[in-house]
Amino acid sequence: MSDPNLPEATVRERNLQRILEAAEGVFARHGYRGASIQAIAAAAGLPKSNVLYYVGSKRKLYMTLLERTMQRWNTALSDITVDDDPASVLEGFIRSKMRLSQTHPLSSRLFANEILQGAPFLQASLRGDMREWVESRTKIFRLWADQGLMDPVDPVWLIFLIWSATQHYADFEAQITGITDRTRLSDRDFASASDFLCQVILKGCGVKAR
Amino acid sequence: MSDPNLPEATVRERNLQRILEAAEGVFARHGYRGASIQAIAAAAGLPKSNVLYYVGSKRKLYMTLLERTMQRWNTALSDITVDDDPASVLEGFIRSKMRLSQTHPLSSRLFANEILQGAPFLQASLRGDMREWVESRTKIFRLWADQGLMDPVDPVWLIFLIWSATQHYADFEAQITGITDRTRLSDRDFASASDFLCQVILKGCGVKAR
DNA sequence: AAGCATCCTGACCGATCGGTCAGCTTTTTA
DNA sequence: TAAAAAGCTGACCGATCGGTCAGGATGCTT
């Protein structure tokens, strides 16, 4: 067995990584049913049998990718407390989510496809982890409103507003680039869109910008 | 041949309607590749051969549904002029789009799937009709900003903000209901969410509410 | 070098895919 | 009422689906 601490990845790790990358693209574009292992194998440059040898089954591969996405979001969207500054928390949330849309658009589209499908694999996660995450935030938003630090807006709708507005730049990139005559969204586009969202949403909720 | 003016629909019209309805659901959930004519036929309660007899091919069926969606949106989102009141125009836009998300969620999800797929069928529409629609609105928003009727926000990002926030209640319904422990979104939910969006977005853009 | 475990893949499986078509039934027309 | 037209569908087509497996290739240990 080779030393796992070596900087160079093993053949296994390297191939598995290529498969996951390729699969994320195919699933993100065509959904669970529409994706084929053949297409994933072709994108990874491996025989179909080899893909199945590594990942076991289409179902397992899909679930692995979903879990990776949920984990990415969990680590990127840090915790907050009542004592934090509302403006910096909201702005941090918006900018973190936008950064995820920019750096991991395929993860976002994979998730979008899962939800469009009725969330057959993520029901438990929605009714568990994500519900808790949202509830803890809504409590804090309500306390902030009580303290006059922001308008008494519905905190659930506020979270979904931020979620949808930021997610949009990953999921609907084809629409944005098509309408605005771009080939792709640049760093400047993401920066200006982030600024816009921070400005409008913070002002819209009556949060004093720092 | 039966009189087409009769209130009762022809067998042809009735069956075609059932097929379109069933197909919209299957395409919206599973995307173009993931949808199967067999599944559409089962949902419509017809033999697979009969579905193909009516619609010709999977491709034609899909394009018919996409065109129907684009037409719905075109008729629902009316024209505006510089002389209109910014507040009522933005509020009307938000509420019209939310009404579409409530009454035609499958249309919205069908469109979302098409965009996730890279808009292979709607490229022309994006670079044509929709681009013109957006450009005409951005011009008016800019004029309003020049006249001090609203903040000088980027009008393109504003349109995408409204688009994404309203679309979300159709496309991500499974996420919303899962997180908020609902079985479905009620009329009251749509009403309160619409109020929230109007309030936050109008205030966020510095538009004076009527 | 020998033995052994892991890695890999071409060939194949039954099921399902989109689509065609011959031929039956039903409706309309003459 | 007979002929023509339109509506309809079971059987079938080649292609592709997800998945299995025998067996060859490769690399590590002794």
Image (tube, coloured by chain):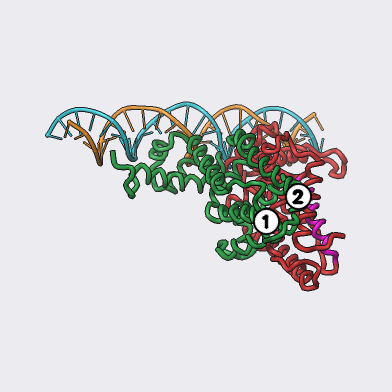
Chain colours: A green, B red, C cyan, D orange
Label 2: which secondary element: loop
Q: Is residue A60 above or below residue A99?
A: above
Of marks 2 and 1, which one's residue comes earlier in the chain?
1
Instruction: State the quadrant of the N terminus of chain B.
Output: top right
Is residue B180 at all visible to an observer of this figure? yes
Quarter residue A197 falls in: bottom right
Does residue A108 appear left or right of residue B63 in this picture? left
Q: Closest to the observer: A64 or D18?
A: A64
- Horizontal and vertical percent for residue B99? 79, 48
- Horizontal and vertical percent for residue B166? 73, 50
Q: Are marks 2 and 1 in contact (CB under 8 Å)?
A: no
Q: Closest to the observer: A64 or A44?
A: A64
**Type of amino acid at the residue the image marks with label 2:** Gln
Quarter residue A55 falls in: top left
**Residue named by callout 2:** A147
For the residues carrying marks 2 and 1, which lies nearer the camera in this image? 2
- Horizontal and vertical percent for residue A2? 29, 41
Q: Which chain is indicated by disc 1?
A: A
Q: Residue at x 42, y 47 (%)?
A: A18
Q: Residue at x 79, y 56 (%)?
A: B93
Q: Residue at x 80, y 52 (%)?
A: B95
Q: Specify the label residue A87 is tagged with.
A: 1
Does residue A83 appear left or right of residue C27 in this picture? left
Does residue A185 appear left or right of residue C1 in this picture? right
- Horizontal and vertical percent for residue B39? 63, 34
Instruction: State the quadrant of the C terminus of chain B.
Output: bottom right
Q: Is residue B19 magenta?
A: no
**Residues in magenta?**
B84-101
